[in-house]
Amino acid sequence: MPILQTVRGQIVDLRRHTNVHLYWRGHYGPTERYEVWLRDTDACEHQFTIHSRTMPARRGHDISLLIDADAVRGIVNWSTGKCVNYLRTDPPPLLKLRDLWALPILFAALVTKLGVIGLLLVLPALLLYILGAVAFRYIDRRRRKATIERALREVQRQHNDNRPTHRRNKSN
């Protein structure tokens, strides 16, 4: 997994977009994405796109985004105290459309190499491929979710450590 970075700031603008019937993305229902404009402590504005149906923040909230090279992986809303791991709330599918290309490739390879015996081995080989792909993606997804959870806890811990503690003087 690429290195996770944290960007903190205040939401300047937040827009929700809904796209319907994006068959090429593998989703057959409406898909949502949020466009977030964030102003950091240096007054620089940054734009992020979050492909999710979950957004625990509104305009004006103070947030931290956990990002990698590909996408936003998590959010901590300091205004409300909510925290979201996007790999947990909107996990990618375990079986992908490109896995169906394995059937003709396996069929051609096994028949040309093994002849008639290859015809008998196509179905078990395809099932083994699909089970292996799903198992690998499941293990990888769990590992990545745990990494993001640890990073979100670390961001929250650093925030709590940097917060000034105010003690009230009790005078009787």
Image: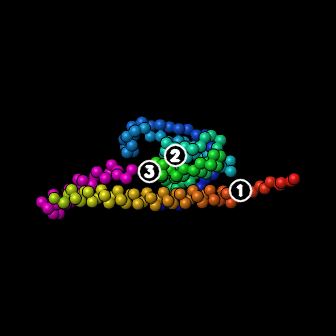
Provide residue 169's location: percent of width, then percent of height: 83, 55
Residue at screen point 37% across, 53% down: 94
Q: Which mark is residue 163?
A: 1
Give the residue type that dot 2 points to: Ile
Residue closest to the far left? 116
Residue at screen point 23% across, 59% down: 125
Would residue 162 be found to the left or right of residue 140 on screen? right
Q: Between 129 and 168, which is closer to the camera in this rendering?
A: 168
CA neighbours of label 2 inside 10 A, class few (<14), some (14 to 19), many (20+): some
Q: Between 56 and 166, which is closer to the camera in this rendering?
A: 166
Q: Quadrant of residue 141?
A: bottom left
Would residue 21 be found to the left or right of residue 121 on screen? right
CA neighbours of label 1 inside 10 A, class few (<14), some (14 to 19), many (20+): few
Residue 162 among those drawn in magenta? no
Residue at screen point 59% across, 48% down: 82
**For the residues bearing labels 1 and 3, Cβ distance under 8 angstroms:** no
**Number of numbered discs visible in the structure rendering:** 3
Query: Which residue corresponds to mark 2?
Result: 50
Mark with earlier residue (2, 1): 2
Task: Work out how far the residue at label 2 is from the one at label 1, CA to CA, in angstroms.
Answer: 28 Å
| First to last magenta residue range | 93-119
Magenta span main SS:
helix
For numbered disc 2, what is the local secondary structure? strand
Query: Which residue corresponds to mark 3?
Result: 91
Give the residue type that dot 3 points to: Pro
For numbered disc 1, what is the local secondary structure? loop
Residue 108 vertical placement versus 39 (above, below): below
Mark with earlier residue (2, 3): 2
Provide residue 5's location: percent of width, then percent of height: 57, 57
Residue 103 among those drawn in magenta? yes
